[in-house]
């Protein structure tokens, strides 16, 4: 990373951290009205850029067609909610932003903090395989299920019978799907008899 990129990253990460609502007030609800994907990334410049790129490709190539997706991000914090740049994390602050298929999502479109939803602070398990934020790849893999659960707990799906299908890890495909796309993967598993898709089935 060049010096210019490092400076841009520092500015981004100082300004794009949506504030938590005042104590005692509920978090704003993120309502999903159409089927789509969720990608999970760290709440950093490079993480958000990568997430937008992935979502853009998935939304463009989805069958059935999906118009919106969600980029969910996580930020390691201490017990007071302050960002933790190094050391062992015990909590995550989780954010989400709706991403539209058209126009093609770009970083510039998502620079405004008001576009982001704060989904709360999620505690990490007492024992986690990679609790140190100094190893971002291993840390991200270790906290993925925590982020998935926080998204499912907080995000409201208005239409009855909407479904969440967690993915991610070493499996191909998006980190989560919701609504009819979950049914699509279930049908695909039956048609292809492919174990990579079978574990996406919704009971």
Image (tube, rainbow, N blue to C red):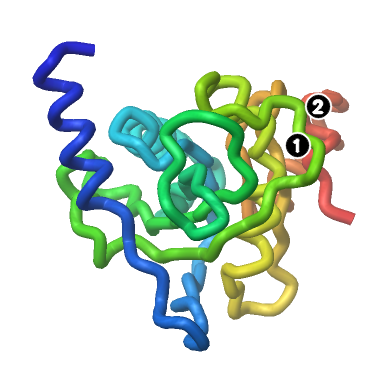
Residue 192's label in the rendered image is 2
With respect to residue 176, does 45 lie above or below? above
User: At x 84% / y 36%, what residue is drawn?
Assistant: 199
Q: Which of 132 and 178 is in front in this view?
A: 132
Q: Can residue 101 be seen in this view?
A: yes
Q: Nearer the viewer, residue 187 or 84?
A: 84
174 with respect to 43 (left or right): right
The answer to whether residue 179 is above or below residue 185 is: below
In this rendering, is residue 108 above or below 198?
below
The residue at which mark 1 appears reads as 188
Q: Position of residue 144 (x, y in %)?
A: 65, 39
**Label of residue 200 in the image:** none
Give above or below for 183 relative to 190: below
Q: Where is residue 104 in the image (x, y as percent from the top left)?
A: 25, 41
Total number of numbered discs in the rendering: 2
Task: Quadrant for the C terminus, please.
Answer: bottom right
Q: Is residue 195 left or right of residue 118?
A: right
Q: In this view, does 187 lie to the left or right of 80?
A: right
For label 2, the crowd category at 10 Å Cα-Cα, with few meaning under 14, some 14 to 19 and many 20 or more, is few
Going by the picture, which residue comes out furthest to the bottom? 24
Which SS class for mark 1? Answer: helix
| Element on which disc 2 rests | helix
**Which image quadrant: the N terminus?**
top left
Q: In which quarter of the image is residue 197?
A: top right
Cβ atoms under marks 2 and 1 closer than 8 Å = yes
Q: Where is residue 158 in the image (x, y as percent from the top left)?
A: 59, 79
Residue furthest to the left: 4
What's the residue at 21%, 35% (across, down)?
Answer: 10
Quadrant location of residue 4?
A: top left
Q: Is residue 60 visible?
A: no
């Amino acid at each position: 990373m060049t010096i210019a990129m490092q400076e841009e990253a520092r500015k981004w990460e100082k300004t794009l951290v949506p504030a938590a609502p005042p104590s005692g007030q509920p978090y704003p609800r993120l309502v999903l009205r159409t089927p789509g994907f969720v990608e999970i990334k760290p709440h950093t410049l490079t993480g958000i850029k990568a997430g937008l790129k992935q979502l853009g490709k998935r939304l463009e190539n989805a069958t059935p067609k999906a118009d919106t997706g969600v980029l969910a991000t996580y930020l390691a914090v201490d017990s007071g909610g302050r960002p933790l740049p190094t050391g062992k994390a015990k909590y995550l602050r989780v954010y989400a932003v709706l991403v539209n298929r058209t126009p093609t999502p770009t970083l510039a479109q998502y620079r405004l903090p008001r576009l982001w939803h704060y989904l709360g602070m999620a505690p990490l398990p007492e024992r986690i395989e990679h609790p140190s934020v100094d190893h971002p790849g291993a840390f991200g893999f270790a906290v993925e299920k925590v982020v998935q659960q926080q998204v499912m707990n907080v995000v409201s799906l208005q239409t009855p019978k909407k479904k969440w299908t967690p993915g991610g890890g070493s499996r191909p495909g998006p980190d989560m799907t919701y609504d009819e796309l979950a049914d699509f993967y279930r049908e695909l598993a039956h048609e292809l008899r492919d174990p990579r898709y079978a574990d996406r089935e919704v009971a």
